[in-house]
Protein backbone atom coordinates (compact mmCIF):
# COMPACT_ATOMS: atom_id res chain seq x y z
CA UNK A 1 0.00 0.00 0.00
CA UNK A 2 1.27 3.47 -0.92
CA UNK A 3 0.11 5.84 1.79
CA UNK A 4 1.14 9.18 0.30
CA UNK A 5 0.19 8.75 -3.34
CA UNK A 6 -3.02 10.72 -3.12
CA UNK A 7 -1.69 13.79 -1.33
CA UNK A 8 -1.76 15.98 -4.41
CA UNK A 9 -5.38 15.06 -5.17
CA UNK A 10 -6.36 15.76 -1.57
CA UNK A 11 -4.70 19.16 -1.58
CA UNK A 12 -6.39 20.25 -4.81
CA UNK A 13 -9.82 19.00 -3.70
CA UNK A 14 -9.40 20.75 -0.35
CA UNK A 15 -8.59 24.00 -2.17
CA UNK A 16 -11.84 23.76 -4.15
CA UNK A 17 -13.82 22.91 -1.01
CA UNK A 18 -12.42 25.95 0.80
CA UNK A 19 -14.07 28.21 -1.79
CA UNK A 20 -17.45 26.75 -0.76
CA UNK A 21 -17.45 27.24 2.98
CA UNK A 22 -19.82 26.15 5.74
CA UNK A 23 -22.27 28.94 4.95
CA UNK A 24 -22.71 27.64 1.41
CA UNK A 25 -23.61 24.11 2.57
CA UNK A 26 -25.74 25.42 5.43
CA UNK A 27 -27.85 27.56 3.14
CA UNK A 28 -28.30 24.75 0.58
CA UNK A 29 -29.40 22.47 3.40
CA UNK A 30 -31.90 25.04 4.65
CA UNK A 31 -33.39 25.64 1.18
CA UNK A 32 -33.03 21.99 0.04
CA UNK A 33 -31.06 23.19 -2.99
CA UNK A 34 -28.53 21.32 -5.11
CA UNK A 35 -24.83 22.39 -5.10
CA UNK A 36 -24.70 22.93 -8.88
CA UNK A 37 -21.71 25.31 -8.75
CA UNK A 38 -19.68 22.93 -6.61
CA UNK A 39 -20.53 19.89 -8.75
CA UNK A 40 -19.66 21.86 -11.90
CA UNK A 41 -16.29 22.94 -10.52
CA UNK A 42 -15.47 19.42 -9.35
CA UNK A 43 -16.44 18.06 -12.79
CA UNK A 44 -14.53 20.75 -14.70
CA UNK A 45 -11.46 20.08 -12.56
CA UNK A 46 -11.67 16.40 -13.49
CA UNK A 47 -12.16 15.06 -9.97
CA UNK A 48 -15.50 13.37 -10.60
CA UNK A 49 -14.12 11.65 -13.69
CA UNK A 50 -11.12 9.95 -12.15
CA UNK A 51 -12.52 6.47 -12.83
CA UNK A 52 -13.25 7.07 -16.52
CA UNK A 53 -10.43 5.83 -18.78
CA UNK A 54 -8.31 8.41 -20.61
CA UNK A 55 -9.55 7.27 -24.04
CA UNK A 56 -12.99 8.66 -23.07
CA UNK A 57 -11.61 11.88 -21.59
CA UNK A 58 -11.25 10.86 -17.93
CA UNK A 59 -8.10 10.56 -15.86
CA UNK A 60 -8.11 6.75 -15.84
CA UNK A 61 -7.15 6.51 -12.19
CA UNK A 62 -8.25 3.91 -9.67
CA UNK A 63 -10.63 3.61 -6.78
CA UNK A 64 -7.88 4.54 -4.29
CA UNK A 65 -7.70 7.98 -5.92
CA UNK A 66 -11.49 8.27 -6.24
CA UNK A 67 -11.79 7.50 -2.51
CA UNK A 68 -9.32 10.29 -1.74
CA UNK A 69 -11.56 12.76 -3.60
CA UNK A 70 -14.73 11.86 -1.70
CA UNK A 71 -12.96 11.56 1.64
CA UNK A 72 -11.49 15.04 1.22
CA UNK A 73 -14.88 16.54 0.28
CA UNK A 74 -16.43 15.13 3.46
CA UNK A 75 -13.45 16.07 5.62
CA UNK A 76 -13.87 19.68 4.51
CA UNK A 77 -17.45 19.84 5.73
CA UNK A 78 -19.02 19.54 2.28
CA UNK A 79 -21.67 17.02 1.25
CA UNK A 80 -20.13 14.38 -1.02
CA UNK A 81 -23.55 12.71 -1.37
CA UNK A 82 -24.45 15.40 -3.88
CA UNK A 83 -21.94 14.12 -6.40
CA UNK A 84 -20.66 10.66 -5.40
CA UNK A 85 -22.89 8.83 -7.89
CA UNK A 86 -21.24 10.66 -10.77
CA UNK A 87 -18.21 8.50 -9.99
CA UNK A 88 -19.71 5.04 -9.71
CA UNK A 89 -22.96 4.87 -11.71
CA UNK A 90 -21.06 5.17 -14.99
CA UNK A 91 -19.15 1.98 -14.06
CA UNK A 92 -22.04 -0.13 -15.39
CA UNK A 93 -21.84 1.60 -18.77
CA UNK A 94 -18.04 1.37 -18.80
CA UNK A 95 -17.93 -2.34 -17.97
CA UNK A 96 -21.11 -3.59 -19.67
CA UNK A 97 -22.17 -0.95 -22.21
CA UNK A 98 -21.81 -1.36 -25.96
CA UNK A 99 -18.98 0.45 -27.76
CA UNK A 100 -21.60 2.88 -29.09
CA UNK A 101 -22.95 3.61 -25.58
CA UNK A 102 -19.45 4.19 -24.20
CA UNK A 103 -18.46 6.45 -27.09
CA UNK A 104 -21.68 8.45 -26.85
CA UNK A 105 -21.98 8.92 -23.10
CA UNK A 106 -18.61 8.66 -21.32
CA UNK A 107 -16.93 11.68 -22.98
CA UNK A 108 -20.01 13.83 -22.28
CA UNK A 109 -20.08 12.68 -18.65
CA UNK A 110 -16.40 13.69 -18.39
CA UNK A 111 -16.99 17.21 -19.70
CA UNK A 112 -20.14 17.66 -17.63
CA UNK A 113 -22.33 17.98 -20.75
CA UNK A 114 -24.33 15.09 -19.34
CA UNK A 115 -24.75 14.12 -15.69
CA UNK A 116 -25.27 10.47 -14.83
CA UNK A 117 -26.03 10.82 -11.14
CA UNK A 118 -29.06 8.58 -10.67
CA UNK A 119 -29.49 4.89 -10.09
CA UNK A 120 -33.01 3.53 -9.67
CA UNK A 121 -33.16 0.24 -7.77
CA UNK A 122 -35.25 0.58 -4.61
CA UNK A 123 -39.03 0.07 -4.71
CA UNK A 124 -41.63 0.73 -2.02
CA UNK A 125 -42.62 -2.94 -1.74
CA UNK A 126 -39.30 -4.67 -2.31
CA UNK A 127 -36.86 -2.65 -0.17
CA UNK A 128 -33.68 -4.55 0.62
CA UNK A 129 -34.94 -7.60 -1.29
CA UNK A 130 -33.86 -6.31 -4.72
CA UNK A 131 -34.78 -9.39 -6.73
CA UNK A 132 -38.44 -8.96 -5.76
CA UNK A 133 -38.72 -5.66 -7.70
CA UNK A 134 -41.99 -5.29 -9.59
CA UNK A 135 -41.10 -2.59 -12.13
CA UNK A 136 -41.44 -4.39 -15.44
CA UNK A 137 -39.97 -3.60 -18.86
CA UNK A 138 -41.92 -5.34 -21.60
CA UNK A 139 -40.25 -5.79 -24.96
CA UNK A 140 -41.90 -4.00 -27.92
CA UNK A 141 -40.97 -3.81 -31.62
CA UNK A 142 -38.98 -0.61 -31.10
CA UNK A 143 -37.69 -1.08 -27.56
CA UNK A 144 -39.34 -1.37 -24.16
CA UNK A 145 -42.48 -0.33 -22.32
CA UNK A 146 -41.93 0.21 -18.59
CA UNK A 147 -44.51 0.17 -15.82
CA UNK A 148 -43.86 0.37 -12.10
CA UNK A 149 -42.58 2.53 -9.30
CA UNK A 150 -39.30 3.37 -7.55
CA UNK A 151 -38.65 5.19 -4.31
CA UNK A 152 -35.75 7.17 -2.79
CA UNK A 153 -34.08 7.69 -6.14
CA UNK A 154 -31.59 10.47 -5.53
CA UNK A 155 -30.60 13.42 -7.75
CA UNK A 156 -33.07 12.59 -10.56
CA UNK A 157 -33.92 16.27 -10.87
CA UNK A 158 -30.23 17.17 -11.20
CA UNK A 159 -29.20 14.45 -13.59
CA UNK A 160 -29.63 13.99 -17.34
CA UNK A 161 -29.26 10.23 -17.31
CA UNK A 162 -30.35 7.47 -14.98
CA UNK A 163 -29.74 3.74 -14.71
CA UNK A 164 -32.90 1.74 -14.13
CA UNK A 165 -33.24 -1.80 -12.85
CA UNK A 166 -36.39 -3.58 -14.05
CA UNK A 167 -37.70 -7.09 -14.41
CA UNK A 168 -37.85 -8.29 -17.98
CA UNK A 169 -39.08 -11.79 -17.08
CA UNK A 170 -41.60 -12.45 -14.31
CA UNK A 171 -40.00 -13.93 -11.20
CA UNK A 172 -42.29 -16.99 -11.49
CA UNK A 173 -40.70 -17.82 -14.87
CA UNK A 174 -37.01 -17.76 -13.93
CA UNK A 175 -34.79 -20.50 -12.48
CA UNK A 176 -32.87 -18.19 -10.14
CA UNK A 177 -34.52 -15.07 -8.77
CA UNK A 178 -31.50 -13.02 -9.90
CA UNK A 179 -32.33 -13.95 -13.52
CA UNK A 180 -34.80 -12.03 -15.66
CA UNK A 181 -33.70 -8.58 -14.54
CA UNK A 182 -32.24 -5.98 -16.94
CA UNK A 183 -30.54 -2.60 -16.70
CA UNK A 184 -31.46 0.41 -18.83
CA UNK A 185 -29.77 3.74 -19.39
CA UNK A 186 -32.44 6.40 -19.59
CA UNK A 187 -32.45 9.96 -20.82
CA UNK A 188 -34.51 11.49 -17.99
CA UNK A 189 -35.66 14.53 -20.01
CA UNK A 190 -37.04 12.37 -22.83
CA UNK A 191 -38.58 9.92 -20.38
CA UNK A 192 -40.50 12.69 -18.61
CA UNK A 193 -42.53 13.20 -21.81
CA UNK A 194 -43.02 9.47 -22.26
CA UNK A 195 -44.52 8.19 -19.03
CA UNK A 196 -42.06 9.07 -16.25
CA UNK A 197 -43.33 11.14 -13.31
CA UNK A 198 -40.90 12.42 -10.68
CA UNK A 199 -42.10 13.36 -7.22
CA UNK A 200 -39.59 14.75 -4.65
CA UNK A 201 -39.56 13.28 -1.12
CA UNK A 202 -39.38 15.65 1.83
CA UNK A 203 -36.64 14.05 3.90
CA UNK A 204 -34.22 14.49 6.81
CA UNK A 205 -31.21 15.41 4.67
CA UNK A 206 -30.62 17.43 1.53
CA UNK A 207 -30.23 14.39 -0.73
CA UNK A 208 -32.73 15.23 -3.49
CA UNK A 209 -34.43 11.85 -3.38
CA UNK A 210 -37.59 11.22 -5.37
CA UNK A 211 -40.36 8.80 -6.01
CA UNK A 212 -40.64 7.70 -9.64
CA UNK A 213 -43.74 6.44 -11.42
CA UNK A 214 -43.48 4.68 -14.78
CA UNK A 215 -46.72 4.65 -16.71
CA UNK A 216 -46.16 2.92 -20.06
CA UNK A 217 -42.80 4.70 -20.29
CA UNK A 218 -41.30 3.97 -23.71
CA UNK A 219 -37.57 3.32 -24.09
CA UNK A 220 -35.63 2.81 -27.33
CA UNK A 221 -33.96 -0.58 -27.72
CA UNK A 222 -30.49 1.03 -27.43
CA UNK A 223 -31.27 1.74 -23.74
CA UNK A 224 -30.36 -1.78 -22.63
CA UNK A 225 -27.02 -1.98 -20.78
CA UNK A 226 -25.41 -5.42 -20.76
CA UNK A 227 -27.29 -8.57 -21.65
CA UNK A 228 -31.07 -8.77 -21.50
CA UNK A 229 -32.24 -10.64 -18.35
CA UNK A 230 -28.69 -10.55 -16.94
CA UNK A 231 -28.81 -7.10 -15.34
CA UNK A 232 -28.34 -8.31 -11.78
CA UNK A 233 -24.69 -9.01 -12.62
CA UNK A 234 -24.37 -5.55 -14.15
CA UNK A 235 -25.39 -3.84 -10.93
CA UNK A 236 -23.63 -6.24 -8.55
CA UNK A 237 -20.44 -5.48 -10.38
CA UNK A 238 -20.73 -1.80 -9.52
CA UNK A 239 -21.85 -2.27 -5.94
CA UNK A 240 -18.43 -3.02 -4.48
CA UNK A 241 -17.12 0.26 -5.91
CA UNK A 242 -20.15 2.12 -4.53
CA UNK A 243 -19.65 0.66 -1.04
CA UNK A 244 -15.94 1.44 -0.95
CA UNK A 245 -16.51 5.00 -2.16
CA UNK A 246 -19.22 5.63 0.40
CA UNK A 247 -16.97 4.17 3.10
CA UNK A 248 -14.34 6.75 2.15
CA UNK A 249 -16.94 9.51 2.59
CA UNK A 250 -17.63 8.15 6.07
CA UNK A 251 -13.91 8.24 6.88
CA UNK A 252 -13.91 11.91 5.81
CA UNK A 253 -17.00 12.61 7.92
CA UNK A 254 -15.45 10.83 10.92
CA UNK A 255 -12.23 12.84 10.68
CA UNK A 256 -14.30 16.02 10.34
CA UNK A 257 -16.18 15.23 13.57
CA UNK A 258 -12.99 14.36 15.47
CA UNK A 259 -11.32 17.61 14.39
CA UNK A 260 -14.36 19.74 15.17
CA UNK A 261 -14.87 18.06 18.55
CA UNK A 262 -11.19 18.41 19.45
CA UNK A 263 -11.07 22.10 18.50
CA UNK A 264 -14.27 22.82 20.40
CA UNK A 265 -13.14 20.84 23.46
CA UNK A 266 -9.95 22.91 23.54
CA UNK A 267 -11.70 26.26 23.22
CA UNK A 268 -14.89 25.83 25.27
CA UNK A 269 -14.34 26.86 28.90
CA UNK A 270 -16.67 25.69 31.65
CA UNK A 271 -15.87 25.54 35.41
CA UNK A 272 -12.88 27.78 34.70
CA UNK A 273 -11.04 25.46 32.29
CA UNK A 274 -11.42 23.97 28.84
CA UNK A 275 -13.83 21.05 28.69
CA UNK A 276 -11.09 19.13 26.84
CA UNK A 277 -9.10 18.90 30.06
CA UNK A 278 -11.64 16.35 31.30
CA UNK A 279 -10.93 12.76 30.40
CA UNK A 280 -14.69 12.23 30.15
CA UNK A 281 -14.57 14.52 27.11
CA UNK A 282 -11.16 13.45 25.73
CA UNK A 283 -11.57 9.67 25.78
CA UNK A 284 -14.67 9.36 23.57
CA UNK A 285 -12.97 11.57 20.97
CA UNK A 286 -9.77 9.51 21.13
CA UNK A 287 -11.79 6.31 20.78
CA UNK A 288 -13.54 7.68 17.69
CA UNK A 289 -10.18 8.63 16.21
CA UNK A 290 -8.94 5.04 16.68
CA UNK A 291 -12.10 3.56 15.12
CA UNK A 292 -11.97 5.88 12.12
CA UNK A 293 -8.32 5.24 11.41
CA UNK A 294 -8.80 1.46 11.59
CA UNK A 295 -11.84 1.68 9.28
CA UNK A 296 -9.70 3.78 6.92
CA UNK A 297 -7.27 0.87 6.65
CA UNK A 298 -10.06 -1.47 5.59
CA UNK A 299 -11.25 1.09 3.02
CA UNK A 300 -7.72 1.29 1.65
CA UNK A 301 -7.44 -2.49 1.50
CA UNK A 302 -10.79 -2.88 -0.28
CA UNK A 303 -9.96 -0.12 -2.79
CA UNK A 304 -6.52 -1.61 -3.48
CA UNK A 305 -8.04 -5.06 -4.10
CA UNK A 306 -10.65 -3.51 -6.41
CA UNK A 307 -7.95 -1.68 -8.35
CA UNK A 308 -5.96 -4.92 -8.72
CA UNK A 309 -9.12 -6.56 -10.09
CA UNK A 310 -9.12 -9.05 -7.21
CA UNK A 311 -12.22 -10.25 -5.38
CA UNK A 312 -13.19 -7.68 -2.77
CA UNK A 313 -16.85 -8.33 -1.82
CA UNK A 314 -16.25 -9.00 1.90
CA UNK A 315 -13.67 -6.20 2.19
CA UNK A 316 -15.96 -3.69 0.41
CA UNK A 317 -18.83 -4.55 2.74
CA UNK A 318 -16.68 -4.53 5.88
CA UNK A 319 -15.18 -1.19 4.86
CA UNK A 320 -18.65 0.29 4.39
CA UNK A 321 -19.94 -1.04 7.73
CA UNK A 322 -16.88 -0.14 9.81
CA UNK A 323 -16.51 3.33 8.31
CA UNK A 324 -20.24 4.10 8.58
CA UNK A 325 -20.25 2.96 12.22
CA UNK A 326 -17.12 4.97 12.98
CA UNK A 327 -18.52 8.16 11.41
CA UNK A 328 -21.87 7.73 13.15
CA UNK A 329 -20.14 7.22 16.53
CA UNK A 330 -17.95 10.25 15.87
CA UNK A 331 -21.02 12.31 14.95
CA UNK A 332 -22.66 11.33 18.25
CA UNK A 333 -19.51 12.19 20.22
CA UNK A 334 -19.19 15.54 18.41
CA UNK A 335 -22.83 16.32 19.29
CA UNK A 336 -22.07 15.46 22.91
CA UNK A 337 -18.88 17.55 22.97
CA UNK A 338 -20.69 20.59 21.59
CA UNK A 339 -23.41 20.24 24.23
CA UNK A 340 -26.39 22.49 23.43
CA UNK A 341 -24.48 24.21 20.64
CA UNK A 342 -24.37 20.92 18.73
CA UNK A 343 -28.07 21.51 18.05
CA UNK A 344 -27.48 24.95 16.59
CA UNK A 345 -27.40 25.01 12.79
CA UNK A 346 -24.63 27.60 13.02
CA UNK A 347 -22.04 25.00 14.07
CA UNK A 348 -22.85 22.53 11.24
CA UNK A 349 -22.46 19.50 13.50
CA UNK A 350 -26.16 18.65 13.40
CA UNK A 351 -26.15 18.88 9.58
CA UNK A 352 -23.19 16.53 9.20
CA UNK A 353 -24.70 14.29 11.92
CA UNK A 354 -27.90 13.96 9.87
CA UNK A 355 -25.96 13.42 6.65
CA UNK A 356 -23.71 10.67 8.00
CA UNK A 357 -26.69 8.84 9.56
CA UNK A 358 -27.84 7.87 6.08
CA UNK A 359 -24.93 5.47 5.71
CA UNK A 360 -26.25 3.20 8.45
CA UNK A 361 -29.14 2.47 6.09
CA UNK A 362 -28.16 3.20 2.49
CA UNK A 363 -27.04 2.05 0.06
CA UNK A 364 -26.97 -1.09 2.17
CA UNK A 365 -27.91 -1.55 5.81
CA UNK A 366 -25.69 -3.03 8.56
CA UNK A 367 -27.94 -6.08 8.76
CA UNK A 368 -27.60 -6.81 5.06
CA UNK A 369 -23.82 -6.49 5.31
CA UNK A 370 -23.70 -8.84 8.28
CA UNK A 371 -25.87 -11.38 6.42
CA UNK A 372 -23.58 -11.10 3.41
CA UNK A 373 -20.48 -11.64 5.56
CA UNK A 374 -21.96 -14.78 7.10
CA UNK A 375 -22.73 -16.16 3.63
CA UNK A 376 -19.30 -15.14 2.35
CA UNK A 377 -17.59 -16.99 5.23
CA UNK A 378 -19.56 -20.10 4.30
CA UNK A 379 -18.63 -19.66 0.59
CA UNK A 380 -22.30 -19.27 -0.37
CA UNK A 381 -21.70 -16.02 -2.32
C1 LIG B 1 -31.78 9.50 1.51
C2 LIG B 1 -31.83 8.20 0.77
C3 LIG B 1 -31.31 8.12 -0.50
C4 LIG B 1 -31.40 6.94 -1.23
N1 LIG B 1 -30.97 6.91 -2.54
C5 LIG B 1 -31.22 5.81 -3.30
C6 LIG B 1 -30.94 5.81 -4.70
O1 LIG B 1 -30.41 6.79 -5.26
N2 LIG B 1 -31.26 4.71 -5.42
C7 LIG B 1 -31.85 3.61 -4.86
O2 LIG B 1 -32.14 2.65 -5.58
N3 LIG B 1 -32.15 3.58 -3.53
C8 LIG B 1 -31.85 4.65 -2.74
N4 LIG B 1 -32.15 4.63 -1.40
C9 LIG B 1 -32.82 3.48 -0.84
C10 LIG B 1 -31.97 2.69 0.13
O3 LIG B 1 -30.96 1.99 -0.54
C11 LIG B 1 -32.94 1.79 0.90
O4 LIG B 1 -33.69 2.63 1.76
C12 LIG B 1 -32.24 0.73 1.66
O5 LIG B 1 -31.67 -0.17 0.75
C13 LIG B 1 -33.18 -0.02 2.59
O6 LIG B 1 -34.37 -0.39 1.96
P1 LIG B 1 -35.79 -0.08 2.67
O7 LIG B 1 -35.76 1.36 3.04
O8 LIG B 1 -36.90 -0.55 1.83
O9 LIG B 1 -35.70 -0.92 4.00
P2 LIG B 1 -36.33 -2.37 4.28
O10 LIG B 1 -35.85 -3.35 3.27
O11 LIG B 1 -37.79 -2.24 4.48
O12 LIG B 1 -35.63 -2.71 5.68
C14 LIG B 1 -36.00 -2.00 6.87
C15 LIG B 1 -35.07 -2.44 7.99
O13 LIG B 1 -35.20 -3.85 8.18
C16 LIG B 1 -33.93 -4.48 8.09
N5 LIG B 1 -34.10 -5.79 7.43
C17 LIG B 1 -34.76 -6.08 6.29
N6 LIG B 1 -34.68 -7.40 6.02
C18 LIG B 1 -33.93 -7.94 6.99
C19 LIG B 1 -33.46 -9.25 7.28
N7 LIG B 1 -33.75 -10.29 6.48
N8 LIG B 1 -32.70 -9.47 8.38
C20 LIG B 1 -32.40 -8.44 9.21
N9 LIG B 1 -32.80 -7.16 9.00
C21 LIG B 1 -33.56 -6.92 7.92
C22 LIG B 1 -33.07 -3.56 7.22
O14 LIG B 1 -31.70 -3.73 7.53
C23 LIG B 1 -33.59 -2.19 7.64
O15 LIG B 1 -32.90 -1.75 8.80
C24 LIG B 1 -32.00 5.79 -0.64
C25 LIG B 1 -32.50 5.87 0.68
C26 LIG B 1 -32.43 7.05 1.36
C27 LIG B 1 -33.01 7.11 2.74
Image (cartoon, grey):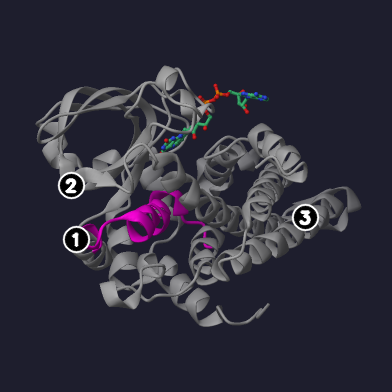
User: In terms of depth relative to the viewer, which is nearer, 306 or 58?
Assistant: 306
Q: Position of residue 202 (x, y in %)?
A: 38, 26
Residue wearing tag 3:
291
Point out residue 23 in the picture as x, y percentages from the top left corner. 41, 53
Q: In front: mark 3 or mark 2?
A: 2
Is residue 295 in sight in this rendering? yes
First in residue order: circle 1 vs circle 3: 1
Residue extent of the magenta highlight:
76-102
**What residue is shown at x 38% (from left), y 53% (from top)?**
92
User: Horizontally, is 45 left or right of 260 in the view?
Assistant: left
Judging depth in this view, the residue of 22 and 297 nearest the camera is 297
Mark 2 burial class by Cα count in 10 Å: few <14, some 14-19, many 20+:
some
Q: Is residue 59 left or right of residue 144?
A: right
Q: Which residue carries the number 2 mark? A: 222
Secondary structure found at label 2: helix
Where's residue 116, x and y in %? Answer: 29, 52
- Residue visible at 56% across and 61% down in the picture: 75
- Measured along the vertical axis of the image, is residue 218 above or below residue 37? above
Q: In which quadrant will I find the N terminus?
A: bottom right
Do residues under tags 1 and 2 come within 8 Å of each other at their CB atoms?
Answer: yes
Q: Is residue 212 above or below residue 33?
A: above
Determine the secondary structure under disc 1: helix
Q: Is residue 51 left or right of residue 162?
A: right
Q: Which residue is mark 1?
A: 100
Q: Residue shown at 69%/47% (left/top)?
A: 334
Q: Foreground: 50 or 132?
A: 132
Helix, strand or loop: magenta stretch: helix
Of the image marks 1 and 2, the number of the one nearer the N terminus = 1
Amino acid sequence: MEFNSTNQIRESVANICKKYGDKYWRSLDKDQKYPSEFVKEMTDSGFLNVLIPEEFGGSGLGLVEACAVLEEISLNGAHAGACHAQMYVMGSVLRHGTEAQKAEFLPKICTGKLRLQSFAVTEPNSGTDTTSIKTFAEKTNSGWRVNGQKVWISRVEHSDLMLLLARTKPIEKVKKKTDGISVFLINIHNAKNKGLTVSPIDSMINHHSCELFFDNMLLPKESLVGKEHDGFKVIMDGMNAERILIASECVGDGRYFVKKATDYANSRRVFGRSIGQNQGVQFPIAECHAKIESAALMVKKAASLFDSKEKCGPEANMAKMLAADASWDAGTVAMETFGGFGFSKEFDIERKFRETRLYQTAPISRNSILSFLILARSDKV
